[in-house]
Image (cartoon, helix red, strand yellow):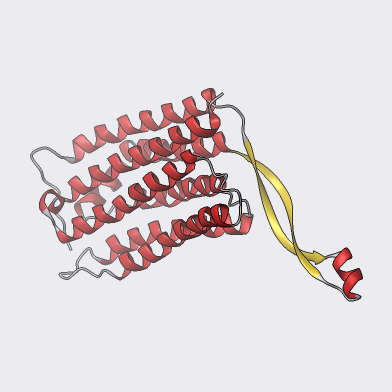
Amino acid sequence: MRLTTKSPTISTSSLNTWNKRLAVLHAVQGILVLILSKGVSWPITTSFLTQDSIASKIAERPVLAPAAQVLFNVNLAHLVATFFFMSAIAHIVVATRGRKTYEADLKKGINKFRWIEYGFSASTMIVAIGVLTGVYDLSSLLMMFVLTLVMNLLGLVMELKNQTNKQVDWLPFWVGTLAGIVPWIVLAIYFIGANVYGSGGIPTFVYFIYGSLFVFFGSFAVNMYLQYKKTGKWSNYLYGERTYMVLSLVAKSALAWQVFAGALRP
């Protein structure tokens, strides 16, 4: 499926300017987070089974119980700055050395750079939200990271499969949606657990992060859907491309400064 790339208001040249400016905006915000934030670290743990000596003595047989060990601490400010710098690097690459490949791909309705960058930056974002929600287990965080990565790579598969199709193949879209929704369900379970079984001590700002970022993440899927349905302005692939840029900046900024206001402000 070949998508239109000409528009009276959007051109590959204007997108190049957008990419340069967004590279600066992302980089500046990443630097500000590092400079302004206090050093707050969260423990990353691993869970395992071990023998419960007291229970084993009472039962007069080996009794296993779950236990956890702190592996290392992660500085949340560094995590937040990382996804800003990932975006900054991606934008500057497509504005300079990768420009020819980027613009040639846009004419075919593809942006490989976008999906690879989103794959890592969005996955880092979901890990940051997970840590704030109380997901400290390394295995759980890794699965959330990889599922979000897979979701974004299926966005690339969607574009590659539909270059020449007369009828859109929606399978990668729906499989990607399934992969992408699972980390949010995991986060919801932690929210519910904190309120039902715990003291409900998750800070209010984390709820705002969950709600706002869930909407923003969903907006990326809506943008793709409108592109392939050729709805209104989205019939022009470049309009959808620019919308992705705006959504990426707003989502990352919203997460970063909500985290700063709630947990990283000195």
Residue at 30 percent across and 36 percent down: it is 19
Q: Is residue 97 visible?
A: no
State left or right for residue 51 relative to residue 113.
Answer: right
Q: Nearer the viewer, residue 54 or 42?
A: 54
Q: Looking at the picture, tell me which residue is in the foreground, 47 or 62.
A: 62
Image: 264 above or below 46: above
Q: Is residue 81 left or right of residue 74?
A: left
The residue lying toward the viewer, choosing from 197 and 239, is 197
Residue at the image position 25 percent from the left and 32 percent from the top: 17
x, y percent for residue 140: 58, 58
Q: Residue at x 19, y 36 (%)?
A: 13
Residue 87: image x %, image y %?
40, 39
Image location (x, y in percent) of residue 35? 53, 23
Q: In x, y percent, where is residue 195?
A: 54, 52
Query: Would residue 65 be found to the left or right of residue 73 on screen?
Result: right
User: In the visual, does 118 lie left or right of 15?
Assistant: right
Residue at the image position 34 percent from the left and 58 percent from the top: 156
Front-lying residue, 20 or 188: 188
Number of numbered labels in the structure image? 0
Image position of 147 with respect to 165: above or below: above
Q: Quadrant of the C terminus?
A: top right
| Residue 229 visible in rendering | yes
Q: Say which quarter of the image contains residue 197.
A: bottom right
The quarter of the picture where residue 53 lies is bottom right
Q: Where's the N terminus, which quadrant?
A: bottom left
